[in-house]
Image: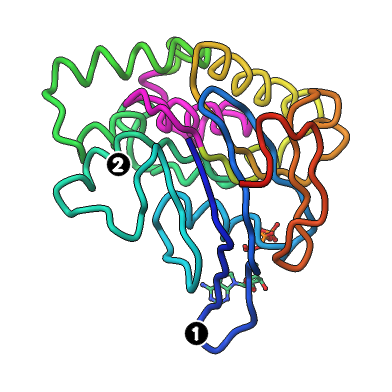
Amino acid sequence: MIRLQRVTKRFDGGAEALHNVSLRVDEGALAFVTGPSGAGKSTLLRLIARLERPTRGRILVNDQDLATLPKSREPQFRRSIGLVFQDHRLLFDRPVHANVALPLEILGYRRAEARKRVRAALDKVGLLHKEGAEPQTLSAGEQQRVGIARAIVHRPALLLADEPTGNLDPALSREIMQLFLDFNRVGVTALIASHNLELISALRKPMLHLEHGRIEARHAPRAASPA
Ligand SMILES: Nc1ncnc2c1ncn2[C@@H]1O[C@H](COP(=O)(O)OP(=O)(O)OP(=O)(O)O)[C@@H](O)[C@H]1O
């Protein structure tokens, strides 16, 4: 599903955010990326989502080399990915359902189909009863769940999450991770960046540890392993 071959990312005028990183995440797997602040976790996810381009190396997502992805296949590529951010980036001037509907609007879904999918996504994260609420009236955990509903509303095959529990207390963090495990159980591949080692170690999933842009350790190497 995801394959990186000797990927290096150097930002203009900056140091290398990633150096010679190779990894593989198989279809249907759920893997974690850990590492201290500045290790390159966000950069790794952004490269896979094609929000950044590598300086060197190859990135394949679903057997498609991202360097040669034709323009005609870009919408299909975007549809295949769901992104979850630490700060969830909800629009506070729109109710919950309109926030969740955003990716569908961008992808050009018809209104009736969009409404159905928004309700299904909110139901999956346990927030259907909040569809008309203003985001600022929700708790931090609920806001993050809205962000997750928005990430999965178009039913992506791949979920990329960047510190999705960063601002949450331990109980809420476990709840959010459980959602990812649930999605993974029904076939969604997931790569999650997290520095919450205590939480993710207990989940017994493959882990890649990044330090200074390099993979320093790999655990449970069957589903996330050297390419
Ligand atoms: N757009 C950018 N321009 C220049 N340097 C960048 C850019 N984005 C990231 N970097 C640098 O790349 C390195 C890796 O950053 P990255 O955000 O990927 O780390 P991270 O592991 O996600 O950190 P955190 O846990 O704090 O989010 C850092 O040194 C950072 O300053």
Residue 72 in percent (x, y) is at: 14, 48
Residue 24 in percent (x, y) is at: 59, 42
Question: Residue 12: which disc?
Answer: 1
Instruction: Classify 84 as above or below 98.
Output: below
Horizontal side, residue 227 vs residue 137: left or right? right
- Specify few, some or many for label 2: CA neighbours under 10 Å numbering under 14, 14-19, or 20 or more: some
- Residue found at the far bottom of this picture: 13
The magenta region covers 131-159
Picture residue at 30% right of the left edge, 42% below the top:
78
Alpha-carbon distance for marks 2 and 1? 26 Å
**Is the CB–ligand 1 distance for label 2 below 8 Å?**
no
Contact (CB < 8 A) between labels 2 and 1? Answer: no
For ligand 1, give the image quadrant: bottom right
In the foreground, 59 or 150: 59
Q: Is 1 contained in the magenta span?
A: no
Picture residue at 68% right of the left edge, 40% below the top:
225
Residue matched to label 2:
77
Instruction: Classify 216 as above or below 102.
Output: below
Question: Residue 142: which disc?
Answer: none
User: Hey, which quadrant is residue 10 in on the image?
Assistant: bottom right
Q: Is 137 contained in the magenta span?
A: yes
